[in-house]
Image (cartoon, rainbow, N blue to C red):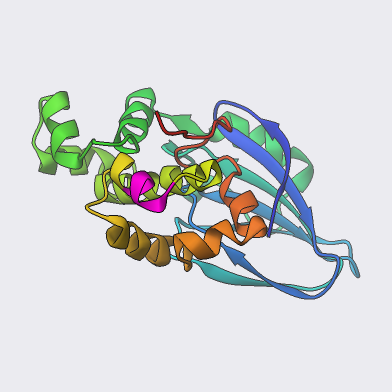
Amino acid sequence: MSALTQANSDRVHRWTYTAEANEVSVVLPDGCVDLVVLSCGRTGRGVLHITDWDLAPRLVRLDAGTSLTGYRLRPGTTLDFAEFEIAGRDLSTLETEIEDRTRHDQEISEMIDALCLPGNSVHRLARQQGVSERTLQRRFSDLSLPTPAFWRQLGRARRAVQALQCRVPLAEIAVHFGYSDQAHMTREFVRWFGRTPVQLRRNPASMTDLAQPGLGNWSGEIAGLT
């Protein structure tokens, strides 16, 4: 499922998608939580759904005519869902309320970005912050965010997958992004995206999905090789 980009802000990215026919789409992990309004073509009624952080590809079944409007939270941005009314709410004020209620911890955001970079690690980041790995993990847990290892592993895979468009040898991509070898990178791609690097290169739809704003690519930049 390739979302149509609409707008991007520091904290929230708005996207839309409409199913032209009955379909089963694959949603790939992007390190983001999305608030999604589903509107049925038959009834026109909107239902609000909140996603979680995906740990693996998942399937989504959509009926023809279903329209989705999503509000994707930047990695590290949080929203207190306990105070966020879902059932029976007025959807016309949703976008404004999301912008008003999101919390963005700049330091955590910078740490997440750092964990995505080639050559970095949770241990190294903890040393840079002058804290233990356990303390670093607690910082993320206190904000109800996944562990630093999650951001490191998914962030590296998402940056590496964007480099597939460069058409350089896969072994070179693996080395650049800190994998022990090409086989290691392949296993991680299958874990996160359900396909090998070769299969992803041959699948334009998946590559388009992975180019959408998310972990390691929020502002739309493509991670190239130097």
Q: Is 153 placed left or right of 180 in the picture?
A: right
Residue at 31% x, 57% y is 182
Task: Say if residue 144 shows up in the picture.
Answer: no
- Farthest-out residue, right: 42
Q: Please count the marks in the image.
A: 0
- The quadrant of the picture occupied by the C terminus is top left
- Farthest-out residue, front: 169
Q: Position of residue 57 (x, y in %)?
A: 49, 66
Task: Say if residue 118 shows up in the picture.
Answer: yes
Foreground: 11 or 169? 169
Q: Position of residue 120 (x, y in %)?
A: 23, 35
Foreground: 92 or 149? 149
Q: Which residues are magenta?
A: 169-174
Question: Does the magenta stretch mainly form a helix, a strand or a loop?
Answer: helix
Residue 195 versus residue 69 in the image, above or below:
below
Residue at 41% x, 66% y is 190
Quarter assignment of residue 23 = bottom right
Q: Position of residue 88 (x, y in %)?
A: 71, 57
Residue at 41% x, 60% y is 189
Does 80 appear in magenta? no
- The quadrant of the picture occupied by the N terminus is bottom right
Q: Is 22 placed left or right of 148 in the picture?
A: right
Q: Position of residue 172 (x, y in %)?
A: 35, 45
Residue at 39% x, 50% y is 157
